[in-house]
Image (cartoon, grey):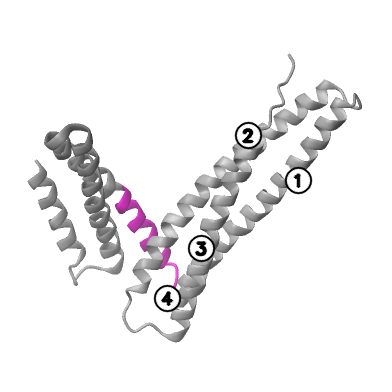
Amino acid sequence: MIQKVFALVVVLVFIAGCAGMSDETRTQAEGTAVGAGLGAALGAGIGYALGGRDGAFIGAGTGAATGGIGGYFYGKHVANRKKEFARQEDYLDALIASAHGVNEKTDALRQEMVQLEAQTAQLVQHYQQKRVQQAQLNDQAKVLTKKVKEGKEQLNALQSEIDIQQKVLAKEQQTQGKSKETTALLKDLQSEITRLESNKAQLETNVQRLASIQLRPVA
């Protein structure tokens, strides 16, 4: 079984490299091949750790299938996006703008969370001083729950953005004969990706801090 899996991966890689393919088809094939290859390797490693050689066979097959599907959809996303632009530079500008938008939204959300944490601490203090009622704490608990959920959703959005941007960056960096403008744009894209990763780590901390606040509503 493992031989069949790796044979499939080899075929996919060969297909991905065919020069006669359109850019769209080649991008989808490359995504499928890379995803299948990485999925097979990872699945085999995990399978071997859990079930020895037989587990490695099964894990490689499952990993190749899952990785191939994921890689295909990544390749399709990139191909569809690239078709919207006549110039590579315009495409990179759009990628940078997308990453920048996610970063700006995350910055705003993180600021809201910091303010909410401070407001909650003050409300608890006022409650202890009997200056506010339990009902206000109950309402605040609902606000916290909603904001934590929003934070988790944004974390998912950040991870998706990071995954796509990193793959695109790696692919575009391999392009031969890049212009000075393209090289500069790739550096800007790398900066936005670094900012995405930093924002994700900080937002995780913000979410954890809000989730740890204990304000139990009274029925």
Q: Residue at x 51, y 57 (%)?
A: 197
Point out the frontmost of discs 3 and 4: 3
* SS at badge 4: helix
User: Which residue sits at x=83%, y=36%?
Assistant: 122
Instruction: Give the amino acid type for the residue marked by disc 1 in the picture.
Output: Gln
Classified by dominant secondary structure, the portion drawn in magenta counts as helix
Q: Earlier in the sequence, mark 2 or mark 1?
A: 1
Which circle's residue, 3 or 2, is located before the other in the chain? 3
- Residue 102 percent coordinates (x, y): 57, 56
Residue 29, quarter of the rendered image? bottom left
Figure check: 141 above or below 112: above
Q: Residues within 10 Å of mark 3 (few under 14, many from 20)?
A: some
In front: label 4 or label 2: 2
Q: Quadrant of the N terminus?
A: top left
User: Residue 57's x, y, as percent?
Assistant: 14, 39
Q: Secondary structure at mark 1?
A: helix
At label 4, counting other C-alpha atoms closer than 10 Å, the crowd grade (few under 14, some 14-19, many 20 or more) is some
Pick out the residue farthest to the right. 131
Closer to the N terminus: mark 4 or mark 2? 4
Q: What is the magenta range?
A: 70-87
- Label whose residue precedes the other's in the sequence (4 or 1): 4
- Amino acid type shown at disc 2: Ala
Gap between marks 4 and 1 measured at Cα: 41 Å
Q: CA distance from mark 3 to mark 4?
A: 21 Å
Q: CA distance from mark 4 to mark 2?
A: 43 Å
For disc 3, the marked residue is 194
Q: Is residue 80 magenta?
A: yes
**Residue, x 44% and y 61% (percent of image)?**
165
Name above or below for residue 180 compared with residue 42: below
Residue bearing mark 2: 211
* Three-letter code for the amino acid on which mark 4 is drawn: Gln
